[in-house]
């Protein structure tokens, strides 16, 4: 959860790095003007709302919160996202537009991947660890907990705890299929490099 300006910077940078977005140079801003990055804008508004909600930033901060809430709401509707603030750790990666519905009581760790048609719902609470990969059509239902480095296969229903780490689960209801490394170690060298870059940034900022 974002609790300081340093956290705010880290979360935004982690989101940018994991998605492969370039830094905001003049050329990059010109490209965004010509070809808008709506998911990138959504991520920026999400983290801004989290920062100005969680941190006491005075009168000006309240005005900024009102502005960013409006932008966040409009972009969410445009993209089909229902993702409340303060649910996801740093390094949230949303590759595509499309319906995503998240309960406000959900808590998911760092370096999560969310594909389209993911639904996370719970009556009281639901939590997922770091490096969880939600394939298309995944549903998490009930007051459950899943651990780190879990890959969830497409169209799976997860309705009970997953105590193992480094596994692929799938089916309805989902069960462990086989061992599998964290998604960024399986999906190509570029993703491993991005996570390493995030970890180096975290070390520089917090140690």
Image: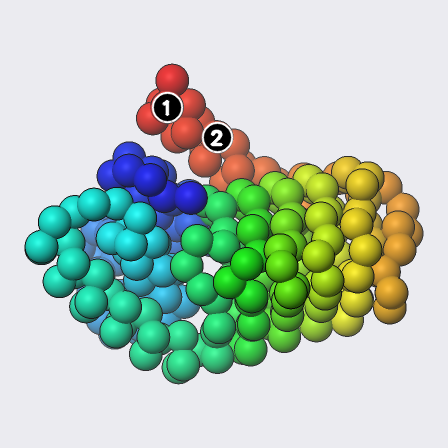
- Looking at the rendered structure, the secondary structure element under dot 1 is helix
Mark yes or no: residue 188 visible: no
Q: How many marks?
A: 2
Q: Secondary structure at mark 2?
A: helix
**Which residue is situated farthest in the front direction here?**
124
> How many C-alpha atoms fall within 10 Å of the one at disc 2: few (<14), some, or many (≥20)?
few
- Which residue is at 32% across, 70% downward? 72
Q: Please state, as top left, top right, bottom left or bottom right, where the N terminus lies in the image.
A: top left
Query: Disc 2 marks which residue?
Result: 199
Q: N-terminal of the two: label 2 or label 1?
A: 2
Q: Quadrant of residue 155?
A: bottom right
Image point 28% across, 38% down: which residue? 4
Q: Tag 1: Cα neighbours inside 10 Å, few (<14), some, or many (≥20)?
A: few
Rendering quarter of residue 71 = bottom left
Q: Is residue 79 above or below residue 196?
A: below
Q: Are marks 2 and 1 in contact (CB under 8 Å)?
A: no
Measure the C-alpha gap from mark 2 to mark 1.
11 Å
Q: Percent from the top left, x then y, of residue 77?
A: 40, 81
**Which percent across, then down, holds residue 169?**
83, 54
Q: Nearer the viewer, mark 2 or mark 1?
A: 1
Between 34 and 89, the one lying in front of the other is 89
For disc 1, the marked residue is 206
Residue 58 as seen in the image, left or right of residue 84: left
For the point 41% across and 67% down, the residue is: 39
């Amino acid at each position: 959860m974002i609790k300081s300006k340093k956290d705010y910077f880290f979360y935004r940078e982690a989101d940018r790095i994991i998605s492969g977005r370039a830094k905001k140079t003049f050329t990059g801003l010109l490209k965004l003007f010509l070809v808008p990055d709506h998911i990138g804008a959504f991520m920026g508004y999400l983290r801004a709302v989290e920062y100005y909600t969680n941190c006491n930033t005075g009168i000006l901060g309240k005005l900024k919160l009102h502005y960013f809430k409006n932008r966040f709401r409009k972009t969410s509707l445009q993209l089909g996202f229902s993702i409340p603030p303060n649910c996801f750790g740093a390094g949230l990666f949303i590759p595509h537009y499309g319906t995503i519905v998240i309960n406000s009581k959900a808590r998911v760790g760092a370096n999560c991947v969310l594909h389209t048609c993911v639904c996370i719902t719970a009556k009281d609470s639901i939590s997922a660890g770091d490096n969880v990969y939600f394939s298309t059509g995944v549903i998490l239902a009930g007051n459950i907990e899943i651990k780190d480095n879990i890959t969830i296969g497409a169209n799976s229903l997860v309705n009970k705890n997953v105590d193992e780490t480094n596994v692929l689960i799938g089916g309805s209801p989902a069960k462990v299929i086989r061992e599998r490394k964290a998604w960024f170690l399986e999906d190509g060298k570029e993703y491993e490099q991005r996570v390493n870059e995030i970890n180096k940034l975290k070390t520089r900022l917090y140690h």
